[in-house]
Amino acid sequence: MISRKKFLKYTLLGGLTPFTKWTKRSFSQKKGTPVVISTWNHGIPANEAAWKVLAESGSALNAVEAGVRVVEADPEVRTVGYGGRPDRDGFVTLDACIMDQENRCGSVGALQHIKHPVSVARKVKEETPHVMLVGDGALDFAMEQGFEKENILTDKARKEWEKWKKNAEYEPEVNIENHDTIGMLALDKQGNLSGACTTSGTAWKMHGRVGDSPIIGAGLFVDNEVGAAAATGLGEEVIRTCGSHLVVENMRRGDDPKTACKKAVRRIVRQNDALNNIQVGFIAINKKGQFGGYSVQEGFNYAVFDKIGNRLLDSSYWTNSE
Ligand code: ASP
């Protein structure tokens, strides 16, 4: 987790332009200039790692993997990877996926004991004829590939679970913490797009529950001809609408990234009578390097690193828009 001091440093480095200006529209980069965008506060340190790859003319694919691994390894982020909160039975089960500029993708669901599920997802993409492996099969594959089996339930996460167990009430809460799944999208100097998404999912979920994050088209979608999108928030809502695919298809029909995200949010809004317990946020980027985000509720933010620097932007949101 980034400290307040670091947060201020990162955001000030991000440029002198006030945040309010950044939330108003989508932005365009010159061709050949890389861009990386990722969800929530933890997107800032993740973007730093991704940018190092992009600045050295590395691929968007390598950038997004390197970026999200920073958050997976951080025990203070209790919604992703090592240190993530367990399910209701006390197991940390991780979901992740990755997708490249050639529509190749790999994914793992309900994977236990592995610190970097995104890298296992990449191996699924590159070393198997499949897209998705889940549960014990995903763990067996990870170990075959040389990943270390380790305990990823930290004391802090275990104590939170023990406290939760006293009442054992499962009620998804909106924005209980301002850092959730990390979804990351990058455009490299060669003009190629890739994306990655990784999470420990909803805290105290049923054992075996898989959210949107490892599902290609829901938590992440990349089409190198058009753009890429990723989602965070209540995964069931994202799956029902095939959210990230919808965002990319909106861009294909001509929407800028922010409008494309807003229309996907509108789909979710229309399918629900009450929004009180629903938060979903989308981020998107197109081939020109324009980017944007949109969420159901206030409180969603995302980090952008481009030639201006690395900065956090507050997303526009539905509940105050109409
Ligand atoms: N989308 C994730 C899930 O439902 C959680 C999140 O982004 O907060 O598993």
Image: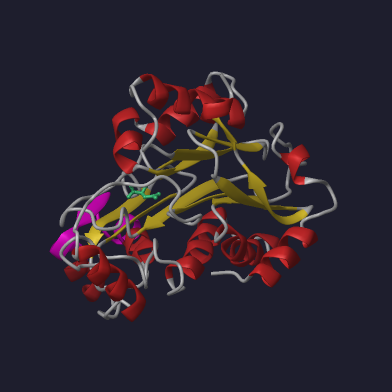
What colouring method underlies this structural image? secondary structure
* 274, above or below 174, in the image: above
What's drawn in magenta, residue-wise? 124-138
Using the rendered view, name the quadrant where residue 245 is placed.
top left
Residue 130 belongs to the span the image colors magenta: yes
Count of residue discs: 0
- Using residue 246 as the reference point, say whether residue 19 is left or right of it: right
Q: Is residue 252 above or below residue 68?
A: above
Residue 292, given in percent of the width and then of the height, sits at 62, 37
Classify residue 49 by image quadrant. Answer: bottom right
Rendering coords of residue 251 (x, y %): 55, 26
Q: Residue at x 59, y 22 (%)?
A: 255
Residue drawn at (17%, 70%), measured in percent from left and top? 140
| Outermost residue toward the right in this view | 16
Residue 129 on the magenta span: yes
Place of residue 146 in the rendered image (x, y in percent of width and height, measured from the top left): 29, 78
Q: Residue furthest front?
A: 167
Give whichever of 127, 18 is nearer the camera: 18
Q: Quadrant of residue 92?
A: bottom left
Is 205 situated left or right of 18 in this image? left
Give residue 31's position: percent from left, percent from top.
74, 41
Q: Nearer the viewer, residue 146 or 40?
A: 40
Taking the spot 19% from the left edge, 58% from the top edge, the residue there is 168
Image quadrant for the C terminus? top right
Residue 187 visible within the image: no
Q: Can residue 230 be seen?
A: yes
